[in-house]
Image (cartoon, rainbow, N blue to C red):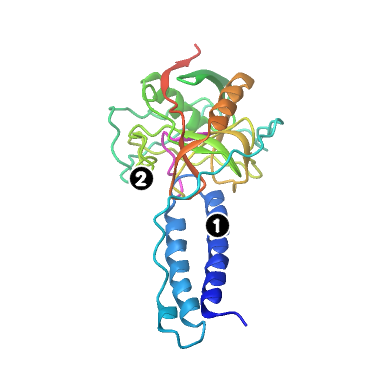
């Protein structure tokens, strides 16, 4: 028959596995923010106490919850990176050309350190492509923006790039396991996992989802807070697997040259792990030194 101590240890191991599974599900649901995971941990912590207290026996020390662990979460190891690209989605019906976009003020994000001006949103082209080279300390990442997919998002991104908004900002979040992407575009990021990911350009971008869109190697998409129409300046570049719901606007693709750079960043690994326990700061800092928009 198992002793109280053995029952406590078994319950603890079981709940640790549950926490890990919930973390995996939470990170797939949201690109920006990890409050859900924090709530899950608190709930499960309460369950730990209940399980231990109901374990039976008259040992008074069995009712005490185990002391909290002071060890940092383990750093995720780099998973296998697929080589096949994910195709860009297509709209079943073309958008009006030109179209009109709105960029309301963002009252929820920290103000940007650089003053920016949103596009006026009038006569926005919904056809054509824009080539941009994101020059970084890790190498050049050429990307192609597709106006037919997300004209309002492309218009905002190009405007920010031309205003020098992205220059000297860092990519603050890297995923190397089930969510293989590099997230960038927070003007306030300082290499601190507790505060990075909260900044924006001072305005928001409307959602431009397409039914059935999928995220995978080569896809460029906007990050958001999980709320409708909450995109801003933050975006993520997928170099591998990314099983996400279609809640993030896809607005372009990454070149083969750029994917090689992203692969090398991923293979360097994660430094400090974030609150979700699955992503974190790139071990080697990635900073945009210039963003060149093709004429």
Left or right of residue 103, residue 132 in this image:
right
Quadrant, the N terminus: bottom right
Tell me the element at label 2: loop
33, 138: nearer the viewer: 138
Tell me the element at label 1: helix
Q: Residues within 10 Å of mark 1 (few under 14, many from 20)?
A: some
Is residue 232 highlighted in magenta?
yes
Residue 139 to residue 190: above or below: above
Residue 106 makes an appearance in the image: yes
- At horizontal 52% and vertical 82% (from top left) the residue drawn is 55
Label 2 or label 1, whichever comes before in sequence order = 1
Left or right of residue 32, residue 150 in this image:
right
Give the percent coordinates (x, y) of residue 32: 45, 45
Read off the residue under disc 1: 20
Q: For the residues marked 2 and 1, what is the alpha-carbon distance in whole angstroms?
A: 20 Å
Q: Which residues are magenta?
A: 227-236
Read off the residue under disc 2: 194
Left or right of residue 129, residue 173 in this image:
left
Give the percent coordinates (x, y) of residue 215: 62, 39
Is residue 85 highlighted in magenta?
no
- At horizontal 57% and vertical 70% (from top left) the residue drawn is 10
Q: Residues within 10 Å of mark 2 (few under 14, many from 20)?
A: few
């Amino acid at each position: 028959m198992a002793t109280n101590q053995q029952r406590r240890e078994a319950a603890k191991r079981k709940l640790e596995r549950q926490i890990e599974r919930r973390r995996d599900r939470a990170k797939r649901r949201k690109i920006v923010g990890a409050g859900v995971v924090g709530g899950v941990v608190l709930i499960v912590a309460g369950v730990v106490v209940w399980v231990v207290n109901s374990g039976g026996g008259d040992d008074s020390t069995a009712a005490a919850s185990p002391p909290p662990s002071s060890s940092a979460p383990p750093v995720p190891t780099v998973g296998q990176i697929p080589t096949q690209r994910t195709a860009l989605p297509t709209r079943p019906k073309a958008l009006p050309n030109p179209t009109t976009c709105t960029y309301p003020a963002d009252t929820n994000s920290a103000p940007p350190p650089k003053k920016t001006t949103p596009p006026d949103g009038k006569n926005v082209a919904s056809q054509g492509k824009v080539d941009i080279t994101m020059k970084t300390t890790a190498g050049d990442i050429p990307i192609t923006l597709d106006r037919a997919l997300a004209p309002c998002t492309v218009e905002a991104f190009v405007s920010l790039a031309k205003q020098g908004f992205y220059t000297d900002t860092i990519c603050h979040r890297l995923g190397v396991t089930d969510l293989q992407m590099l997230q960038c575009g927070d003007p306030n990021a300082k290499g601190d996992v507790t505060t990075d990911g909260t900044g924006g350009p001072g305005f928001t971008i409307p959602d431009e989802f397409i039914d059935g869109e999928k995220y995978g190697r080569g896809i460029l998409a906007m990050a958001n807070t999980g709320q409708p129409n909450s995109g801003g300046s933050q975006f993520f570049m997928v170099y591998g697997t990314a099983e996400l719901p279609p809640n993030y606007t896809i607005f372009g693709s990454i070149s083969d040259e750029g994917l090689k750079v992203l692969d090398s960043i991923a293979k360097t690994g994660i430094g400090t792990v974030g609150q979700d326990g699955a992503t974190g700061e790139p071990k080697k800092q990635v900073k945009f030194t210039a963003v060149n928009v093709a004429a």
